[in-house]
Amino acid sequence: MAARSICLPALLALGACAFAAPLLAQTYPTKAIRMIVPFAPGGPTDIQGRWAAQQLNAAFGQPVIVDNRGGGGGVPGTEAVVKAAPDGYTILAGNPGPLTISPTINTKIPYDTLRDLAPVMLIAKSASCLCIHPSLPTKGVKEFVALAKSKPGMINYGSPGVGTVGHLATELFATQVGIKLNHVPYKGAALYTIDLIAGHIELAIIQFAGCAPLLQQGRLRAIGATSAKRTPLLPDLPTVAEQGVPGYVSYNWNGVLVPAATPKAIITRIHEVLSKQLATREAQELYLGQGHEPGGGDPEEFAAFIRAEIQKWAKVAKAANIRE
């Protein structure tokens, strides 16, 4: 009898939890939701975070307030979500910088991406072009590599800063083809694009939508795409991998995450809304037209993607001795 009396409360608790999960999904949300974007307004993470916020607002009938918390490479804004109550009312517009790169080059990052955050869905992946100043006498990857090998450390490339995707993606390229480049960090893509056009640097990685008009105007030249396949925006531009660098792929990306202890029922509810809207023709055309590859998939697939990205960039950082 004693054993039965001890087990009964536990069984009742389990039953209550099983009943509460679907009920929680049905009632959530009952108040405004905060979407934290860990970067300033106007960038890709902000744009895609606002798209997600709009979809959730329309589906839930509750305000989804976008809270831009720029600075610190996105780490402070990401930390704010990690420390928030895991109740579905604080959502992160995620980006690889603070999620998969900073944790590999800085041991003082105040969170563990895989432990402290629960992935919901990948929204989109954004590939780029390896762009050079038109004065360089090269038209493709092989010619550029030959030039760089003849001038080790003398070709300057720009990035949005130490530990950004642009920084590590360029170092990944340099490592794979066996060249030495000189890194010039900037405070944003717009600044190094201006300097590349002016000829103050010779190379930079620029996202498709940003570089396409500059390429058409002849102000820049692209030697390869960082995507796994050619982009409809620039169908005649071969990928870097096509040009003798097998396996070279680099994406910036954006997705939605929540604090790790958020109930699965809420994660499922958010995922269902975003997945349904991302699959619409309107969303697909929007993202493809901007040079992005629409995401999707379930939370487990997004988690596996993040895990693979962390492993990839950790190897690049170690090989290039990149530390913050």
Image (spheres, rainbow, N blue to C red):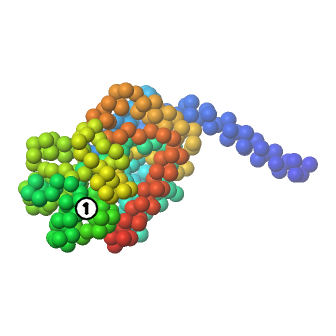
If the image is split into quadrants, where does the C terminus sit?
Answer: bottom left
Q: Give the percent coordinates (x, y) of residue 186.
A: 20, 60
Residue at the image point whose x is 23% and y is 59% from the top: 142
Instruction: Examine the image and state in which quarter residue 22 appears.
Output: top right
Residue at the image point whose x is 10% and y is 46% from the top: 218
Q: Is residue 208 left or right of residue 241?
A: left
Residue at the image point whose x is 34% and y is 73% from the top: 321
In terms of depth relative to the viewer, which is nearer, 286 or 65? 286
Task: Please indicate, yes or no, whether residue 158 appears anywhere in the rendered image.
Answer: no
Q: What residue does disc 1 label?
A: 161
Which amino acid does the dot numbered 1 rest on? Answer: Gly
Q: Is residue 48 left or right of residue 140?
A: right
In terms of depth relative to the viewer, which is nearer, 115 or 293? 293
Residue at the image point whose x is 62% and y is 37% from the top: 21
Depicted 69 relative to depicted 155: above or below: above
Q: Give the percent coordinates (x, y) of residue 49.
A: 35, 41
